[in-house]
Amino acid sequence: MEQYDTDIELVNRIKQGDKTAFDVLVLKYQHRIAVLVSRYMYDPAEIHDVTQEVFIKAYKAIHLFRSESAFYTWLYRIAINTVKNHIASVARKPVDVEYDEMNISDKHYHQFNLRDTSTPENFLLRDEIEIVVFEAVEGLPEDLRTALLLRELDGLTYEKIADVMECPVGTVRSRIYRAREAIEVRVKPLLERE
Amino acid sequence: MTEKERKAISSLMDAEISAEKSREVFTEIMQNQDLTAVWQRYHLISDAIRRQLPKSVSMSLPDQISDALGKDANKK
């Protein structure tokens, strides 16, 4: 099967005024963009805000997206520009030198706790998700694990995975789905605590 | 939520689906919150496997973006 650019379908819907289609794209790319932003700044609250800003800018500029590049490439460029602008604006802000050491610590403490993303629970959640996912992957039957990792880590198409594993494409489709289901059963309870 | 729907989401994530079918599955994802949540969790799992999770994971970011865009639209 020829691979179809599924993002374009969502972008077309957004251009027609369907905001829900944008929510689906946010769910797909939120972590990748946050990781990209985090290469340029440390404060999780700042990363959260800049990530949010990236998506808001993308939504407002979606009519300018011409499908000449992949949607993620376009979003990536917006993210880099937003990060650069943010860093420049922070650098222009005057530094308040009247804090003594204690106050600076307090200030940083409060900055780290102002938004929900900076809570210890969210740091913990991230670690727990990673541990649970890797444990679940380790616990998968070998055929499911191989199919999933060839897809996720090597980016192979189902057809190529079928060649490697010497099985029909339908079997690959089923193995990848069953692998995701087995992992999702372990991840879902963590998210329901949120 | 049926196994068929969840399997279709898995195939959609990997772009191993026809254009016509992808339109159908996206419509289902957008109309059914349970399927939206599956889409979100499958992507979270994918990001975790590829070590693409940020330092802290907030599941509320999409809602916050949606709220911000809603407020912005109301201002106009």
Image (tube, coloured by chain):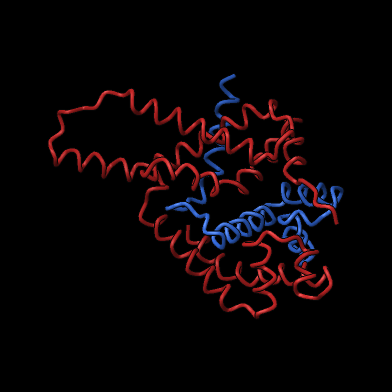
Chain colours: A red, B blue
- Name the spot of residue A27 as percent of width and height, x first: 61, 48
Figure quadrant of residue A58 = top right
* A68 to A151, vertically: above or below: above
Image position, residue A96 (x, y; %): 21, 27
Taking A179 as reference, is B22 left or right?
right
| Residue A28, position as x, y percentages in the image | 63, 49
The number of discs equals: 0
Relative to B3, A60 lies left or right: left
Residue A22 lies, with reference to residue A136, above or below; the image says above
Q: Tell me what residue is drawn at x 31 percent, y 24 percent.
A: A93
Please identify the residue farthest to the top as the structure is shown. Answer: B76
Quarter residue A188 falls in? bottom right
Q: Residue sitting at 66 percent across and 45 percent down?
A: A24
**Residue drawn 80% across and 52% down?**
A3
Q: Quadrant of the N terminus of chain A?
A: bottom right
- x%, y% of residue A193? 48, 61
Between A129 and A165, the one lying in front of the other is A165
Residue at 45 percent of width and 27 percent of height: A85
